[in-house]
Amino acid sequence: MRQNGTAGGTGGPSGIDCRFSSMTGYFAHSPKNGIAAQTYAAHIRGVLLLARRYAKEAGSYLVKDDMKFLRLIENVAAFHDLGKLDEENQKVLSGELSASVLPLNHVDAGAAYWLQDQHFSALTAAVIQAHHRGFPDFTAEQNKGDFIFRDAAIARLVDSKLSVYDDLHQRLIHDPICFTNCDEISSDRSVFLRMLLSCVVDADHTDTSHHYTKNQSKDEQIQLQPDKRLKQVNQYIEQLKKTSDAGERNRLRELMYVACRDSLVFAKISSCDSPVGTGKTLAILAHLLVLAQKRGLRRIFVIQPFTHVIEQTVETYREILTLPGENPEEVVAELHHRADFENENIRHLTALWQAPIVVTTAVAFFETLASDSPAALRRLHELPGSAIFVDESHAALPAALLPMAWKWMKVLANEWNCYWVLASGSLSRFWTIKAIAGDQLNFEVPEIVDANLRKQLAIYERQRVVYRYDPKAKSTAELVEWISSVPGPRLVIMNTIDSAAFLAHQLAKTCGRTKVEHLSKSLKSEDREATLRKVRLRLENKADCDWTLVATSCIEAGVDLSFRIGFHELSSLASLLQIAGRINREGLLERAEVWTFTIAEDGMLKQNPGLKQAGEVLKHYFEKGQVISPELTTQAIADEIALYGLNSKYKNILTNETLQNFVSVERDFKVIESNTNVALVDKEWVSKLSGGDLNWHELQKVSVEISKYKLNHFKISKIIDDLYYWNLGYDDFLGYMAGVIKQKEAQTEFKNLK
């Protein structure tokens, strides 16, 4: 319902003008830590300047509605803080009074302004309302009737003062903004709204941080320069050829690189099903650089399923892609967990997508697309006009989330000029499954590698490993005995962080610490990197055979490691195929074994309920003697959906996205069901944070993600917002699970004493 009013008038309720005119200035942010208050005029002009820039950058890739996109952003930027001009708010903002929150919700006035008949724009009002708290569910918002996109508790009070706010605003800003008829758009409405909010929030946060000297200037962003970086990749590959051994695997890798780099692709989404160990990470990078040059793309995203894979990829990319005089960390951004914070004091820790090459996880990437949070959406406007490589795409998302993700992929490709490559050694062509793609089964997703080369690669892959299955559920003691009895080096993959850490702990107690390594997200980034370096050195030492690496699925994809034998706790077919890629990787052994097993829950061995259905499908294939191969991957997803269907919650995501029910979409689109928070594990870094000496690059290296259940169960203290300090104990072998295991063992001993 449109609101009536008299915006633009100079009058107002008796006495208000007098109080306003007696003030010496009007402020948007209060004085803090010795820094003067920021004036309202300076902030609005600063946000307008930045928002226009972001809108033009992102909007240049928008196929339709580009001018409406710019105008709507100008509308929001100009009036987003209109309510701060209220006399009670000014007392706090000027520093006259001290308060943790403003007396009057300052967001409501801007929304009210754009809901008036004379310049009605519901989209502008919606984004203004959302710029601090995020988008609501629009279905619920519509049920508010006359108070849609308004704060009903203060709406009438704000309406009575609106003309005064408007008059002050016009006198302070001198930048007449009143663009109407911008609400009718042909682009996907939900993605369009998120992009609008992204530009404005980033401008708002950036201008504010500049004022308080937390400098995040974007004036000198490094450009992609795909031609120059491609030249360096080519040179790197030529050097590899000179130092590599002659052999079938390396010959195929060379063919793979050339095929990807020189592929003539005209589609907006393509695929690559190259087996593991064929060098697709660099081959597809070269392909993306060529496409970026041809299509005028500004950024490359590499989406990987697991954190440690990012670390290996980033190390290689920085070595190859950094041009003379550049800072490698600014060329290739390494984003582990989302680390999004609303609190103004730690906003500078928010990880943004500003580098020319961004390497991040599927969780961080896709949950950003699903978000209604301003802190998370702040980075989204950097995505249009990008090449996006979803590496090991089979592991990126659970099947239930693929319908929504597929829609976003098509929207970003068709409307925002993004180019996608979906790649995996066990590629699932989910877009050919009706339950996922719906009625659009004819969407073209061509291969970037020709059929003949793919056939050669597949033949080599089938000669490398043999798959075995042991149906008897095994206890911890049985697993330790079985694993340690076979020649190594051995790789064991468990389905939960708890199980991996506990099994590693028990192997160390039974066989000795030198006989076991452990890798999972219970370790902070720098310790995962150190563990990987140690594992590589041990694998290079052919005399060092009697040891085991126990890991979670984080080791499945994208890591160039090769073990003699593999053990895989029953989960998905795609997971098994990826683990096989870490066994006999160079084909030096004749058909090495990969065993699949199940666990008997005892002590801290825990099954992962999220993998039960996919595991049942794989178990069925073993029981009926099905030949395990990458060709089965798409069928496995189709079989899982046929047997178990798609949970109604996930079916509703598409409906809620269409209805702009943003809260519901964010709530239900969870790549990993267990909610986690970021936790520091070193007290020294807690002190640095409180002193403002910790940036988001450092935060990623010295923190871990821990489930909210564990944080609550162990009563872990919160530092600020959703950032915690883990005080139960941490070591570089088991990570934060060292503290959990110590607690559990102490509880067991206490029970035994009783």
Image: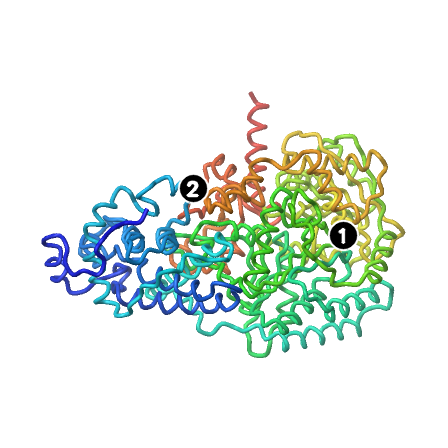
Q: Position of residue 670 (x, y in %)?
A: 55, 44
Q: Label 2 belongs to which residue?
A: 139
Looking at numbered disc 2 in the image, what kind of residue is underneath it?
Answer: Thr
Residue 206 in view: yes
Q: Amino acid at mark 1?
A: Arg
Q: Are marks 2 and 1 in contact (CB under 8 Å)?
A: no
Relative horizontal placement of residue 656, taking residue 545 as reference (left or right): left
Q: CA distance from mark 2 to mark 1?
A: 48 Å
Q: Which residue is mark 1?
A: 582
To which quarter of the image does residue 167 belong? bottom left
Nearest the viewer among 260 and 179 is 179
Image x and y of residue 154, in percent:
24, 45
Q: Residues within 10 Å of mark 1 (few under 14, many from 20)?
A: many
What secondary structure is found at the residue carrying circle 2? Answer: helix
User: Nearest the camera: 347 or 426?
Assistant: 426
Identify the residue shown where x is 83% and y is 62%: 453
